[in-house]
Image (cartoon, rainbow, N blue to C red):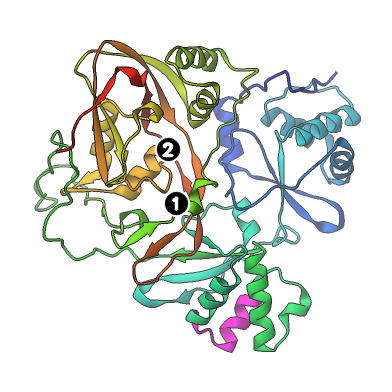
């Protein structure tokens, strides 16, 4: 018999080979009337959080959907195994599909309609539209993000004025507008040759979230500043400038610390846009924790963290280990300049080793690459990484270290001159190491 999971049982994590296969071979299946769908399985890279999966509110709707999919028994068997559930190879088609229905209802498998695809044909190129300062835009169907990751994407959900203003600023010719409209999955009536109707239809699709805009920025070196950015930490000094590749073997050109919106001092992130959308991608069932997670949860509880915060910490990373600290050890936390740190809510910090790791990767020629730090530490948008808080351990203690996982958010940056980027999606890969301590043994040191 096939094993059908319940809320009281966890799924088995696929091995590395299976996970690699899942990341390289996205599963696209065909349903009724030629409609195509992306099946998103556990442990796959997350899909952009602005794209919502199909909702199955009860087993009846899931059953109807599953039985209409053009998927044979062998492929269902492979899908279930990749999802972490290992049925007997001799089960019948009803049992296989019954297990799939259960996984859909439990949101273990998610379904994303691919409205921009027909017959597995995807447009290879969307019209690039030139804008000032070497920036290029192109419009895409939002569902493209279910099968492809793109670094910078703008959404205009429920923002008709911003969408209209954006299109007007592009000053599209009639030919360009026709090409843009042709690429997008708009109703036939909105592809009228009349320019006003076309623009109205495009704005409507952008506000519904059916159409997004990809932003491509040039790799440009900004003018040299008068002096290096000075983050208030006495323990870090700028590295000397390298004069050329002949000076040392294995020389690599320095990473440009000014690329990326988080590095632009003239732009301020809008807190209200990101505060409700920041999400970690790791799933945690507090009633069915792995032995590793259970041990970490117990240690965090002993540190005094409430259950809600423990769950947040477990979702933020994995590979939990205990690390011992002595009196006088330094602990660090990136922050926004002028924003006071609340020690009793500081659950995501860095020790000397993890801070040195961040510095090695993102401190170049006297400047911190704040955009890189944001991605590596999965920082929320309101944390501008423009200052570093330094803390000191006041008595021996044990901290819980973990590897930071992926996170996503919607964000917007605004300039003092009225410029705004509009709402965009952001995927932060994580990968750094964070530390959680009993904050009662920490003392915040005065800034330098």
- Left/right of residue 267 with respect to residue 225 in the rendered view: right
Q: Is residue 83 visible?
A: yes
Name the quadrant containing residue 343.
top left
Foreground pick, 132 / 244: 132
Residue at image x 68%, y 76%?
Answer: 201
Q: Which mark is drawn over residue 164?
A: none
Q: Earlier in the sequence, mark 1 or mark 2?
A: 1
Quarter the C terminus occupies: top left
For the point 30% across and 17% down, the residue is 441
Residue 132, x across and y down, in percent? 38, 77
In the image shown, does 41 or 213 lie closer to the viewer? 213
Spatial CA span between label 1 and label 2: 21 Å
Marks 1 and 2: CB-CB under 8 Å?
Answer: no
Q: Is residue 130 left or right of residue 31?
A: left
Residue range (magenta): 170-182
Quarter of the image where one finds residue 231: top left
Which SS class for mark 2?
loop
Q: Is residue 172 magenta?
A: yes
Membership of 44 in magenta stretch: no
Query: Label 1: which residue?
Result: 271
Residue that badge 2 annotates:
430
Number of labelled discs? 2
């Amino acid at each position: 018999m096939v094993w059908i999971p319940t809320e009281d049982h966890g799924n088995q994590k696929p091995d590395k080979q299976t996970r690699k296969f899942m990341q390289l071979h996205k599963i696209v299946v065909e349903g009724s009337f030629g409609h195509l769908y992306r099946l998103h399985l556990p442990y796959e890279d997350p899909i952009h959080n602005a794209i919502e999966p199909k909702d199955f509110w009860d087993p009846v709707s899931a059953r109807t959907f599953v039985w209409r999919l053009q998927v044979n028994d062998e492929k269902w068997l492979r899908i279930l195994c990749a999802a972490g559930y290992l049925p007997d190879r001799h089960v019948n088609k009803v049992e296989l599909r019954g297990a799939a229905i259960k996984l859909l209802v439990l949101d273990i498998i998610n379904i994303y309609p691919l409205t921009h695809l027909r017959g597995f044909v995807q447009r290879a190129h969307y019209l690039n539209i030139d804008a000032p300062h070497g920036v290029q835009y192109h419009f895409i169907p939002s569902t493209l993000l279910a099968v492809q990751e793109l670094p910078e994407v703008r959404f205009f959900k429920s923002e008709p004025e911003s969408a209209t203003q954006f299109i007007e600023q592009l000053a599209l010719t009639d030919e360009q507008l026709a090409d843009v409209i042709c690429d997008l999955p708009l109703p036939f009536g909105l592809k009228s040759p009349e320019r006003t109707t076309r623009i109205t239809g495009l704005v409507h699709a952008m506000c519904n979230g059916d159409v997004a805009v990809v932003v491509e920025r040039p790799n440009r070196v900004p003018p040299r500043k008068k002096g290096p950015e000075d983050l208030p930490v006495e323990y870090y000094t700028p590295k000397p400038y390298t004069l050329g590749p002949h000076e040392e073997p294995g020389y690599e050109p320095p990473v440009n610390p000014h690329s990326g919106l988080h590095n632009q001092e003239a732009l301020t992130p809008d807190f209200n846009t990101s505060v409700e959308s920041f999400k970690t991608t790791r799933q945690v069932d507090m009633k069915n924790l792995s032995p590793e997670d259970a041990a970490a949860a117990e240690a965090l509880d002993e540190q005094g963290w409430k259950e809600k915060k423990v769950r947040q910490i477990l979702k933020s990373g994995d590979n939990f280990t205990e690390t011992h600290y002595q009196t006088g050890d330094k602990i660090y936390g990136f922050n926004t300049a002028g924003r006071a740190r609340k020690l009793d809510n500081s659950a995501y910090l860095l020790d000397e080793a993890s801070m040195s790791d961040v510095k090695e990767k993102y401190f170049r020629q006297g400047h911190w690459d704040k955009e890189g730090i944001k991605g590596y530490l999965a920082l929320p948008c309101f944390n501008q990484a423009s200052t570093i808080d330094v803390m000191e351990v006041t008595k021996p203690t044990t901290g819980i270290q973990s590897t930071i996982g992926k996170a996503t958010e919607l964000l917007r940056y605004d300039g003092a001159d009225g410029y705004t980027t509009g709402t965009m999606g952001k995927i932060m890969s994580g990968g750094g190491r964070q530390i959680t301590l009993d904050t009662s043994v920490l003392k915040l040191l005065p800034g330098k």
